[in-house]
Amino acid sequence: MRVATANSYDQTIAHLMQRQTELVAQQERISSGKRVQRASDDPVAAVLAETAQNRIARVQADLRALEASRTSLAQAESALGESGDLIQQARELMLSAGNPTLGERARADLALSLSGLREQMLALANRQDSAGRTLFGGLGGSSTPFVEVFGPSASGVRFDGLPGQAAAGKHSLPQALDGQAIWMRLPQGNGSFTISQAAGNSGGARTDIGRVSNPSALSGQHYSLSFAEVGGVMQYSVRNTSTASPVAGQTDMPFRAGSTVEFDGMAFQLHGNPAAGDRIEIAPVGGPTDIFQVLQNTMDALRYTGPAQGARLSHELARALTELDAGLDRVLQARSQAGDWLNRADSLQALLSDRSVAHQTEQARLEDLDMVQGISDFQRQQIGLDAALKSYAQVQRLSLFQHIG
């Protein structure tokens, strides 16, 4: 087979061009710092590096979501702290209102102070984070979860959010707390039954909030304790208004201040000086109350100027303090939960940050160029190209025509 000189030259030129292309490619790797710049450079490493990049993107997304949750939870925890302070201030005002020497004007001033605290607490319950999300809207549903309602059929504060709370995920935390569970689900009275004075009472009869003496004996029915004066002696009788029948052992009983009345699993103490015809109503708890209604009831009791004002106020204050303490416990529990989530956010952030570093290290191991090795390879290829060019320059001058003649 005859090989022409031109064909030999063409092959040599092709080899030189290939060496030059490899040199340019190595220079590109050095300038970018990447060993794998396209899938064809190393298909396996390119696929693994792409997987690592996707994991890094997911971790960064989790970190951004976690930071948003942390910001919201920090603001919610701060708002709950302020709410606890407001409840403490309200409690101090209620204790002050129990002073029997206070006049009507002083009681009105205390009611006005409680009204201001109530408005501040309502504003806290509707507080939003820096992104405009409600902090205590539960699962959402309203930009103003707590709404003041005025009307003949109902008045007070209504929760317009969605009850409940998003569960904390593996790498995420809720951004809103369940405001209904914090402020709107307080047990009335002692949690089992409530004791209230009849509207027409004129004497000073009052009771404590009562207690459950025998849970198995509770009937869940309504009762009425009425006072009557017989032969100059004040007596009381208890009647089951649900069945319209007297309670056994509680009929025409002599009244003694500080004595305990116990029947059907319930017990409470009688205080004050009742008047004939006064009544005390005992009813099972029909549903929860809320912190705003507790404050409103206290304000109404402070502004009341009718008969037996002192006894009614003392009775309402005792109940309000019990319900207010239950509300403070709810707020403190919610604040503790928010603080626990903030601690968990710190742990999650450290975990996700370490995971991101691990993924970045893996990606760098697959893609990045070893600069020492890269520069060494570049110099070796450059020397090889220079030698090839010089040898080609010597060979291409060789010809038979130089030896003829």
Image (tube, helix red, strand yellow):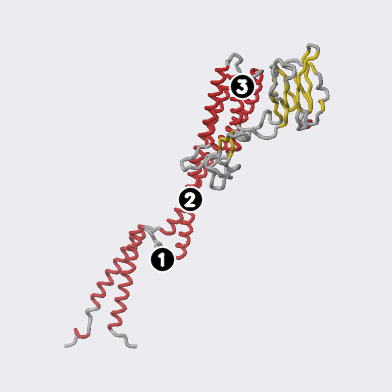
Which marked residue is nearer to the observer: mark 1 or mark 2? Answer: 2
Left/right of residue 75 with respect to residue 371 in the rendered view: right
What's the residue type where badge 1 is placed?
Answer: Asp
| Residue drawn at the location 71% of the way across and 25% of the way down | 210
Q: Residue furthest top?
A: 232
Which residue occupies the foreground of this view, 129 or 22? 129
What's the residue type where badge 2 is placed?
Answer: Ala
Instruction: Say which quadrant the N terminus sits in.
Output: bottom left
Which residue occupies the foreground of this view, 374 or 199? 199
Q: Residue 116 location in percent, x, y?
A: 52, 27
From the viewer's perspective, is residue 151 above or below residue 208?
Answer: below
| Residue drawn at the location 59% of the way across and 19% of the way down | 97
Instruction: Say which quadrant the C terminus sits in.
Output: bottom left
What's the residue type where badge 3 is placed?
Answer: Tyr
Q: Residue furthest left?
A: 405
Q: Residue 62 location in percent, x, y?
A: 50, 49
From the viewer's perspective, is residue 23 above or below residue 280?
Answer: below
Going from the N terminus, do you reach mark 3 or mark 2 first?
2
Q: SS of the residue at dot 1?
A: loop
Q: In the rendered image, which residue does mark 2 sit on?
A: 61
10 Å neighbourhood of mark 2: few (<14), some, or many (≥20)?
few
Q: Residue 276 location in percent, x, y?
A: 75, 17
Left/right of residue 319 with respect to residue 93 in the rendered view: right
Residues at discs 1 and 3 in contact (Cβ within 8 Å): no
From the viewer's perspective, is residue 323 above or below residue 27?
Answer: above
Which residue occupies the foreground of this view, 150 or 344? 150
Q: CA distance from mark 1 to mark 2?
A: 30 Å
Q: In the rendered image, which residue does mark 3 sit on?
A: 304
Q: SS of the residue at dot 2?
A: helix
Q: Residue 260 location in percent, x, y?
A: 75, 20
Left/right of residue 164 with respect to residue 223 in the rendered view: left
